[in-house]
Image (tube, rainbow, N blue to C red):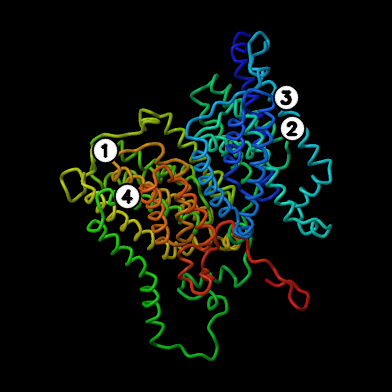
Amino acid sequence: MELLDGHLIPAVDGVAFGLLLFVVAAGLSLAFGTAGVLNLSHGTLYAIGAYTGAELSDGTWGGLALGLAAGTAAACVAGAGLSAATAPLARRGHLAQALLTFGLALIGGDLLIQFFGADELPVRVPEALDSSVTLLGHRYPAYRLCFIVMAVLLAAFGTWLLTRTRMGAAVRAAADDPQMLAATGHSPRAVHTGVLAAAGALAGAAGVLGAPIIGPGPGTSENVLMLSLVVVVLGGLRSLWATFFAAVAVGEVQTLGVSVAPELAPYLLFAAMAAVLVLRSRFTEPTGAGHGSEAPGPDPVARLRGLLAGRPASRAAAGPLPGRKRSPVWPARLPGRAAWWQAAPLLVLLIVLISLPALLDAYSISLAGSALALGLLAVSVTILTGYAGLPTLGQTAPFAVGAYATANLADAGWTVGPVQLVLSALAAAVFAAVVGPAVIRARGTTVLMITLAIGELTGAVVNQLKSVTGGADGLVGFPATRALWGGEGMLEESELYNYALVVAVFAVALTLLVLRSPAGKLLTGTRGAEARMRASGHPVGRYLLVAHVCAGALAGVGGSLMVTVQQYLSPADVGFEIAAFALLAVVIGGTTSVVGALLGAGLIVATRDWVAGSWPGHGPLLLGVLFVATVYALPRGLAGLRGGSGGGPSSDAPRPPDQPPPAPTPSPAGKVSP
């Protein structure tokens, strides 16, 4: 009884915190489940309401009402603007939406800090609520009890609105059958805008009302977004009441869990999120092209055989062309010319990279070395996203394993660079092999969420396992890496850069050889026609697991390089933001372009650390602009610019993740043709 009495206040706090998350997650669920928008800027909508409410709060009921109205309206307008921003991406899938909204979140977060300041704002509530009441013998804040009542009423009102009104019926129809909704005279576009505006209003209202609980400040939006994603995953998208109970459970873990089992609390949420997603994916049999639907065109298995034989897809499907003699000269010359044309960007990039030490100052050379490390991480994301069809936001997990392995090896006296690389790659590969079965079964957005959970769990381990990682302080002061050809540790920026360049060239060359070998073609075939590959007896799961392990090893090499170049390591170097940057680098370069991923990583590092140096404090704003511009201006990445008219990929290239197949169009005879 004494134990229950001692944990009563944290338990009630968990209810209040959970209901706050419910209001936010209800908007996120509405945007994703109904409007089909994976909104990673939803936490920023919460922050808009929180900052606005805090700024207008003056300790009176009028100030609270004014702040609630203004904060809700501002977030509602931002949600409606989000509808317009995502409209051009309607057929490009959730990956493009995630990158766009993450970029908007960076821009919005920077603007909020510039407008309201970097410090957490104080919030003043009406005097009647700025007191405590007696609850089972304990004093408890009156405002939190009031918030609990308001959140329960909001849940009941939202459920009634969605299930018992014509407006709710239109919203459900927009998600289930937009064509039928249009036939009834309603505009699906208007409903879509209204849904996102309502989702923004919910987030804004939660921000105003939750400001006394989670005050507005740096990091608030990201924290709220992550917890809301956990709630949506656990509660699903079908029922507000399921979201309600999931939110309360998350709130209890965050408060009561910290009180009862503080050593386990950091892991419980994302472990539960990953477990739920993995269990759901077990009941869904992966089928179709692009791990979801089959594209029209030649038989993909025949296309795969043609790729393995070095023939074009159309020749593999249709056989030799009749009435045409084979030239004894051109077939021998064309592959050579094509190979040189494909290798030209890589050769030009290599020449530029070799000449950088003679052109740049020491700081810029150090940034170039960091870009090479991030570039290897981006290439590992290319393997998974572009070739295996597994879009990932958690590749920083094996990256972190490789990084911390190198730092600890150096601290233990193992300072020879190649030894560090091999052992770090091996550790990252083992990690990828352990978590791989949880990833390779899922597809599309579910993969993004599972890998996000794995990345966040790894981040929790980094913060908790201080004896190995240094915790939040990171690691510094370990001995410098020695190149195999040298006796002393490398300290000069030019030495570190040259070492990183040699390692990166070797790793990229090996990656290209594998991707262009029959093994790489099998992986491409798995990406393009998984159902037929399975039907023809190919062990698709084994192919994907091998790709996941190899990508993990490559990420481990990148992490090792980062530690060698930087000579320090902090949790921020392996966090969610770096994962998003790696995915952006892949989108910049084109999802199947290794060279493009390297260029994208260089552009990100240059923007974040070099360009932002002339405008201090605005690095997130510049990166956000880069995100948004890339999504709109380079739908197929830099590689698409070399693809001829329209920059589209060839018929043999895998379709970008989550991109739907071309819509069928009616033929003149009334039949549907692709």
Disc 2 crowd, CA 10 A, few/some/many (<14, 14-19, 20+): some
Identify the residue under disc 2: 154
Above or below, 257 relative to 292: above
Question: How far across and how far down the image is residue 529, in percent?
Answer: 58, 63
Disc 1 crowd, CA 10 A, few/some/many (<14, 14-19, 20+): many
The reply to whether residue 513 is visible in this rendering is yes
Q: Decide: marks 4, 1 in contact (CB < 8 A)?
A: no
Three-letter amino acid code of the residue under disc 2: Leu
Identify the residue under disc 1: 410
Question: How far across and how far down the image is residue 116, in percent?
Answer: 52, 36
Mark 4 or mark 1, earlier in chain: 4
Three-letter amino acid code of the residue under disc 4: Leu
Q: Nearer the viewer, residue 643 or 355?
A: 355
Q: What's the distance in space between the residues labelled 2 and 4, CA to CA?
A: 50 Å
Three-letter amino acid code of the residue under disc 1: Ala
Identify the residue under disc 3: 149
Q: Nearer the viewer, residue 619 or 586?
A: 619
Above or below, 295 relative to 362: below
Horizontally, residue 610 falls left or right of residue 76, namely: left
Mark 2 or mark 4, earlier in chain: 2
Q: What's the distance in space between the residues labelled 4 and 3, CA to CA?
A: 52 Å
